[in-house]
Image (cartoon, helix red, strand yellow):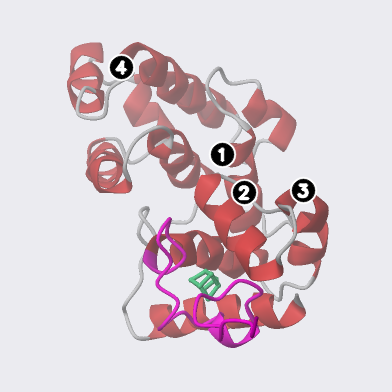
Amino acid sequence: MREVVERIEGWLRRLERRGEYEPAWGDREDVYAVALAGVLHQRTRRELAEPVLRELLRRYPEPRDLLSAPERELRSLLSRIGLVERRLRTVVGLARLLAECPRPSRRKLLEVPGVGPYTADLVAAVVYEERVLPVDANVRRVVERSTGRPVEKVRGEWVKSARSPRDLALGTIELGRRHCRSEPRCDECPVRPVCAARSDEEPRPS
Ligand code: SF4
């Protein structure tokens, strides 16, 4: 597993160095931006969620800006990705918490209605560099295919091998997007030489 993890981290770093990858929140890796990304990406395609996130951060760069925004403006922005009432409650709840406490604990984040373990773990890994892995369907697919084991059994070991929990979390998410999709694109996948499930294996002789 260590080899898989090293390859994912190394790949992410190379992409960033070459300017071929940028997180949805740009270069501001703070709790506000990363937590907003986590909640906006739930139940929405990334192509739809990212422009809304960027626009929110542009118009309301700090939690207090969002708290003083007219509700109709927020509704209009969130209507691009649906679940408006729910998301409105969540983004306002987040802004309220972060205006008071810019670096809340995982427990505090989870108290905000609509913030689930994925968002809390994304913040913990990316902003706090804690050894946790945010798991959604894409991350589950990458981990389970590449290790051949259920994510629940291996997530502890997965993050333990990381040099940077941030790079590993973002690399795993990105790998699920670019290569390890429902129909995997193994040919150019950086994990292929050490993957338990790569699709180019020779068929076993009968
Ligand atoms: S080699 Fe294929 S199955 Fe393995 S992680 Fe890469 S894309 Fe997924």
Q: Which residue is mark 1?
A: 119
- Tell me the crowding category of disc 4: few under 14, some 14 to 19, or many 20 or more residues within 10 angstroms, Cα based: some
| Span highlighted in magenta in the image | 178-206
Name the one closer to the observer, 201 or 1: 201
Q: Which residue is mark 3?
A: 152
Q: Which residue is mark 2?
A: 134
Disc 1 is placed on an element classified as helix
Name above or below for residue 43 compared with residue 48. above
Residue type at numbered disc 3? Glu
Disc 4 is placed on an element classified as helix
Residue type at numbered disc 1? Thr
- Distance of label 4 from label 2 (alpha carbons): 24 Å
Quadrant where the N terminus lies?
bottom right
Residue beneath the point at 42% across and 20% down: 92
Q: Is residue 194 magenta?
A: yes
- Main SS category, magenta section: loop
- Tell me the crowding category of disc 1: few under 14, some 14 to 19, or many 20 or more residues within 10 angstroms, Cα based: many
Q: Position of residue 114 (x, y in %)?
A: 52, 21
Q: Are marks 3 and 2 in contact (CB under 8 Å)?
A: no
Q: Are marks 2 and 1 in contact (CB under 8 Å)?
A: yes
- Distance of label 3 from label 4 (alpha carbons): 32 Å
Residue type at numbered disc 4? Val
Tell me how many marks there are: 4
Q: Is residue 191 magenta?
A: yes
Mark before the other along the chain sequence, 4 or 2: 4
Mark before the other along the chain sequence, 1 or 3: 1
Q: Nearer the viewer, mark 2 or mark 1?
A: 2
Q: Which residue is mark 4?
A: 84
Q: Nearer the viewer, mark 1 or mark 3?
A: 3
